[in-house]
């Protein structure tokens, strides 16, 4: 699974442009499940279990990653952009990106040219630009057009003993977990869904949940960990190395309380490391799924991730295993009557 995460993280695919990820996944699941691709581009895969399920279950992860979209090319050949998904401008300045295979650098006004007022705050996205080495707008247009996507250039590497650093861990790790589950024998019939456009408003989850019409849903995600120098107590939100994160509430969902408690009791029974989020923050595909049709009982199982939505997301490999183990257990033991 670790090698697959590395492979998936090196692929590029932002919201609405998930084709590279979708093509890879389809090749990997074709021999293990029946699947369809809907109009938005979601992959809806059905895996036959050893027993039928009376209560329909949907397990999902999203394929898209945050990125930048080119909005304007100025006369000097610099590219203006906006963000696809939520990216803090503080992680952008000086970073290397790729636009149609052309390497660029995100530039900003030099500090020695800033006014005293400008030095008091970090530049906004509108103050930044991408430099691909072009000398004019005509030169730049040989390689780039408005609407093209700039992706972070970031190697996937292991840090220390247990850590993994890459772009797009949110949520390619979740896609890798789904692939492992699809390839193995499972107890009950299950729908595995690889969604699109999560980063711009959980749009793929909305249409795929309507199509599948599940009774239960498990959302596999990455969530913000702030276990950093100078951060104490509940402000850490969750911590690397302490297991899968199961939330009671975020900005998009108040999770089913019975499923929340069941997840913790199941983790205890199976000796799986588990923790909760100590801040009501963020959101994921659950926000669309739990409101679909007549309502869906939903739980989110996440890997804690430092520096999320940046070129250098960092996770603990043991937490990835905990997420897989908990989701696998939930598939086997969720209520089925």
Image (cartoon, rainbow, N blue to C red):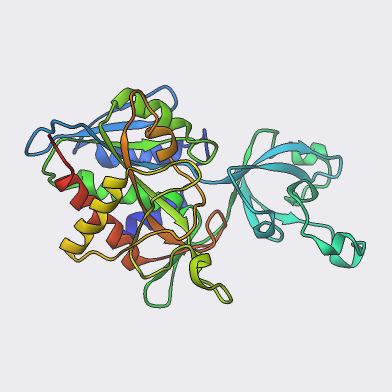
Q: Is residue 187 left or right of residue 166?
A: left
Which quarter of the rendering shows the C terminus? top left
> Who is closer to the viewer here, 246 or 102?
246
Residue 36 lies in quadrant: top left
Q: Is residue 20 left or right of residue 310?
A: left
> Who is closer to the viewer here, 144 or 89?
89
Q: 56 above or below 121? A: above
Counting from the top left corner in percent of width and height, residue 301 is at 34, 51
Give the residue at the far left of this rendering: 50
Q: Please tell me which residue is depicted at 52% across the width and 41% down the height of the picture.
A: 199
Q: Please tell me which residue is depicted at 79% across the width and 57% down the height of the picture.
A: 108
Q: Is residue 272 left or right of residue 133?
A: left
> Who is closer to the viewer here, 296 or 152?
296
Q: Is residue 25 left or right of residue 151?
A: left
Counting from the top left corner in percent of width and height, residue 1 is at 29, 57
Q: 272 above or below 103? A: below
Residue 48 lies in quadrant: top left
Q: Please tell me which residue is depicted at 24% across the width and 55% down the height of the picture.
A: 326
Counting from the top left corner in percent of width and height, residue 56 is at 21, 31
Counting from the top left corner in percent of width and height, residue 141 is at 74, 36
Q: Please tell me which residue is depicted at 83% across the width and 40% down the height of the picture.
A: 74
Give the residue at the far front of this rendering: 257
Q: Can the viewer see residue 178 in this picture?
A: no
| Count of marks, rendered view | 0
Q: Can the viewer see residue 149 in this picture?
A: yes
């Amino acid at each position: 699974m670790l090698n697959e995460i590395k492979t998936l993280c090196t692929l590029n695919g932002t919201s609405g442009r998930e084709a590279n990820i979708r093509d890879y996944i389809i090749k990997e699941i074709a021999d293990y499940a029946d699947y369809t691709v809907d109009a938005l581009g979601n992959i809806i895969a059905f895996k036959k279990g050893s027993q039928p399920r009376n209560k329909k279950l949907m397990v999902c992860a999203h394929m898209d990653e945050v990125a930048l979209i080119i909005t304007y090319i100025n006369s000097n050949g610099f590219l203006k952009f906006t963000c696809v998904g939520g990216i803090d401008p503080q992680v952008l300045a000086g970073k290397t990106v790729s636009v149609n295979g052309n390497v660029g650098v995100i530039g900003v006004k030099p500090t020695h040219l800033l006014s005293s007022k400008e030095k008091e705050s970090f530049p906004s996205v509108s103050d930044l630009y991408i430099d691909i080495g072009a000398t004019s707008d005509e030169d730049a247009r040989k390689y780039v057009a408005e609407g093209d996507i700039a992706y972070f250039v970031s190697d996937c590497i292991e840090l220390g003993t247990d850590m993994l650093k890459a772009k797009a861990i949110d949520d390619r790790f979740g896609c890798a977990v789904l692939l492992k589950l699809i390839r193995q024998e499972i107890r009950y019939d299950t729908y595995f869904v690889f969604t699109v456009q999560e980063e711009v408003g959980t749009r793929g989850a909305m249409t795929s949940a309507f199509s599948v019409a599940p009774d239960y849903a498990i959302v596999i995600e990455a969530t913000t960990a702030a276990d950093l120098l100078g951060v104490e107590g509940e402000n850490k939100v969750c911590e690397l190395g302490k297991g899968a994160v199961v939330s009671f509430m975020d900005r998009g969902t108040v999770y089913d309380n019975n499923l929340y408690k069941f997840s913790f009791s199941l983790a205890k029974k199976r000796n799986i490391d588990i923790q909760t989020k100590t801040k009501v923050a963020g959101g994921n595909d659950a926000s669309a799924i739990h409101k679909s049709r007549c309502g869906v009982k939903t739980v989110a199982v996440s890997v804690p991730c430092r520096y999320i939505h940046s070129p250098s997301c960092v996770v603990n490999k043991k937490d990835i295993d905990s997420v897989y183990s908990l989701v696998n257990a939930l598939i086997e033991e969720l209520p089925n009557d």
